[in-house]
């Protein structure tokens, strides 16, 4: 099992070295400090997220953003209809010319 590319054995070795270098008392202090820093970071992150949501709501309420999906769908449907009509109109003369080539000339 790896955590951030560090295996279990490497993690245990790092923890043992930290205990040897700093001592058990300092390790617990460092852990408390890291926990407090993490909680503060999460608090700041949540506060920023709330402020971003408030700004989004304010922008959406002040700006009247029209829903453009319906006009786009209507335009796409109209273009598809026109394309089918044009394809149909172009295929009729091609079929007639192919039929004329297939009929043998009268003697």
Image (cartoon, grey):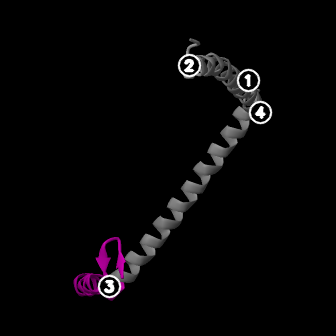
102 relative to 25 in the view: left or right:
right
Viewer-nearest residue: 11 or 66: 66
The residues colored magenta run 1-25
Residue at numbered disc 3: 8
Of callouts 3 and 1, which one flags the residue occurring earlier in the amino acid sequence? 3
Residue at numbered disc 4: 61
Q: CA distance from mark 3 to mark 1?
A: 63 Å
Instruction: Report if the CB atoms under discs 4 and 3 are less than 8 Å apart.
Output: no
Q: CA distance from mark 2 to mark 3?
A: 86 Å
Q: Is residue 87 above or below residue 38?
A: above
Residue at numbered disc 1: 78
Residue at image x 56%, y 11%?
107
Quadrant position of residue 54 = top right
Prevailing SS of the magenta stretch: helix
Q: Quadrant of the N terminus?
A: bottom left
Q: Residue 48 appears at what percent x and percent y?
A: 58, 49
Q: CA distance from mark 2 to mark 4?
A: 74 Å
């Amino acid at each position: 099992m790896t955590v951030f590319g560090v295996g279990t054995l490497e993690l245990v070795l790092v923890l043992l070295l930290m205990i040897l270098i700093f001592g058990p008392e300092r390790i617990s202090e460092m852990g408390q400090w890291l926990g407090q820093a993490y909680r503060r970071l999460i608090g700041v992150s949540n506060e920023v997220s709330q402020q971003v949501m408030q700004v989004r709501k304010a922008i959406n309420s002040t700006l009247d953003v029209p829903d453009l999906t319906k006009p786009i769908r209507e335009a796409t449907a109209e273009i598809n209809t026109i394309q089918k009509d044009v394809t149909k109109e172009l295929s009729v003369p091609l079929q007639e010319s192919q039929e004329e080539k297939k009929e043998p000339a009268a003697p």
